[in-house]
Image (cartoon, rainbow, N blue to C red):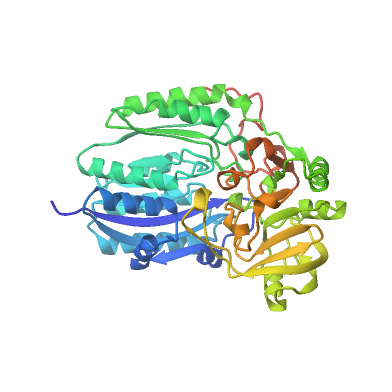
Amino acid sequence: MTPPRIALGAFMLESNAHAPIATREEFAANYLSYGRDMIRDLASAAPVGPKTLSGFFEAMNASGAWTPVPLMGTTVGASGPIDHPFFLEVADSLESRLRAAMPVDGVFLSLHGAAIATGEVDPDAVILERIRRVVGPDVPVLATLDLHANVSRRMVDAASVLVAYRTNPHVDMAERGGECARLMREILAGVKPAAGFVKLPLIPPSVTQNTKSGPYADIIAYGQSKIDARVMNVSVVSGFSLGDTPKNGMSVTVTTRGDAALAQALAKDIAQACWNDRHRYVPSLTSLADATRLALECGRDAAKPALLFADVADNPGGGGRGNTVWILEAFHKAGVEGALLGVFFDPALAAEAHALGQGAQFHARFNRNESHPLSGRFEADAVVEGLHDGNVIGRRGISAGHTILLGPMALLRVGGIRVVVISVRQQCKDTAMFEVFGIDIAAARSLVVKSRGHFRAAFDLLFPDERIIEVDVPGLTTPVLSRVPYRDVPRPIFPLDPDVAWAP
């Protein structure tokens, strides 16, 4: 048989509706690749681009002959709504390149599922629908989704199979891409997928969505228990709490081998089990005053175990600016010693440190060019202790083995705190972000990370769960949903409306 021709594309953005607009320049600084360059990126020793795409590519290679047809791909992790002209550029490029490449036997897309454009509420659906119009009803269109996708009926109807991650932190991205390769082969061999879908009026706060334990771990395990010879995939997607769109909320998508009634019945059953557990999705945060006291105690008493402080309200992985100063300012004012903080997004400060050179002493002005009111300003005397070009190979966690682009980096000492400053906004998701400066993280008395949860897969050997403190400070990614200025989420919805009644 002629090897199947499979088109490849990627569009990954998690849109915080209240964050600044995601521009073409921001996407290009992270990942923007076209045609054969995508294959080069995927085949490199430390691949660039989404792990789901490289996972699909590797699994297709391992499972038999095929011809990859690379279209284009771009990712930015998390930011605000995408600038609509650039979104149209992405959608037009995917569609036109696919038309030029026809015929194809299948399409694989690496999506996030929680994008918003300044002129479109459901960009992921638009892309899937455009692809479907080109290839027709019978060509399989498979896509991976983040666990934080806000899934719509339009997305489900346009795709053959949607495969969401099952881990948070997302250490299974490559596996889910590989799963799509396996399902693609199965569909090409004649299997006809059928999908069931249920949307819940439930927005789980971000810090309640870990999959090591807790309610989300339990419902994912329950969904996976339904996989059998009839069921191809079960995806229980928590949704992105800060998307602020009519498609916000948890969802369940079940794909079977041709049995639509079974798919819908299972989706309803899993959704009901999830709804019954809704009161377990309650965040537990530590005040800034208490966090500062704990950090002071760690710095003064070497016998105490070191602590990790998660700045969950300023998570660039959820659209945060990665530059709020509230913890830094409080720790510095209190005289905390032996602390590390990273990674702090401030291109102007990093550029100044590079211009001054290693060893320079200067007065550091954090956020001199930042206008968002939640970021704040902070000034202090500092020393440049290290400089780096920002091309980092992930060592542990969700980016292990992949290239992380951080732009020019600087390690600054500010009193008793060492701060890693970066020029491309990223969450603190890998120990390598500190280790490139020769830092022994195990020697730190306290560590502050700008991340909601992906750090857990990288720093787990140093900081078990009982030594992780989630700090309650202002930021664009606050898990305290009563503080989020929602406008467009469907109402009533739990927990904003605690007495809402619902049945699937």
Q: Is residue 349 above or below residue 418?
A: below
Looking at the image, which is closer to me, 210 or 18? Answer: 210
| Residue in the image at 60% along x and 64% along y | 424
How many marks can you see?
0
Going by the image, does 467 lie left or right of 293? left
Going by the image, does 154 lie left or right of 204? left
Position in image of residue 271 (x %, y %): 48, 26
Going by the image, does 105 lie left or right of 289? left
Looking at the image, which is closer to me, 365 or 273? Answer: 365
Position in image of residue 393 (x %, y %): 51, 60
Position in image of residue 95 (x %, y %): 35, 59
| Residue in the image at 61% along x and 59% along y | 435
| Residue in the image at 67% along x and 74% along y | 354
The residue furthest right is 334
Looking at the image, which is closer to me, 188 or 83? Answer: 188
The residue furthest front is 303
Q: Is residue 285 above or below residue 407?
A: above
The residue furthest left is 1
